[in-house]
Image (spheres, grey):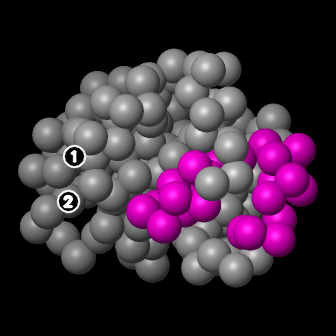
Amino acid sequence: MRTTEIGTDYITIDEESINDKRLQKIPRVHLIKLAFERPTDSKVRKVLDLFPKTNRYVIDDNIKLYNNILKYTNKKYYVENSVYSSAITFFKKNNKVLVNFGNFSDVDKKYLLDISVFEDVLKNTEVIIIDQENYEKFKSVLEKWSGNVIINNGKRF
């Protein structure tokens, strides 16, 4: 398991933050969430130019547009489940996913955080966002997992 820190290893870029010099000074950003209100080819390419060492991106909407841009690069992207998305629909539609447990309904979250289901989710996932309490609960399982864990500690990301 690799733990990814929000704000340094994992940042969000949108129209407001695309020119943020503080973010551009981070030596190596592991994951960037592309969260443009109105994404365009030029905005995405600007992010790729500003962060040349970053090879992994996160998207949660405008999937077709981002796919059309990123498929011609050597960049990998994950689709993040949106707030209160259905777990079943989300997993059926996407194969490279970032599972944000905080975005699921309480019913889906309870089901997905059952130990046997949780272990199955990890088998098919490379990146998850989980709160501190559940991180502690599943720490022994996560330590054996080869994916990325982003601990949601309340920071904007």
Residue 148 coordinates in the image, percent (x, y): 61, 68
Apparent side of residue 21 relative to residue 63 in the rendered image (left or right): right
Residue 105 coordinates in the image, percent (x, y): 59, 20
Residue 70: which disc? 2
Between residue 4 and residue 55, name the one nearer to us: 4
Q: To which quarter of the image does residue 37 belong?
A: top left
Q: Are marks 1 and 2 in contact (CB under 8 Å)?
A: yes
Apparent side of residue 75 relative to residue 71 in the rendered image (left or right): right
Q: Secondary structure at mark 1?
A: helix
Between residue 11 and residue 141, name the one nearer to us: 141
Residues under labels 1 and 2: Cα distance? 6 Å
Q: Secondary structure at mark 2?
A: helix
- The residue that mark 1 highlights is 66
Quadrant of the image for the C terminus? top right
Classify mark 2: residues with Cα within 10 Å, few (<14), some (14-19) or many (20+): some
Can residue 134 be seen in the rendering of this structure?
Answer: yes
Q: Main secondary structure of the magenta part?
A: helix
Apparent side of residue 65 relative to residue 150 in the rendered image (left or right): left
Residue 89 coordinates in the image, percent (x, y): 31, 30
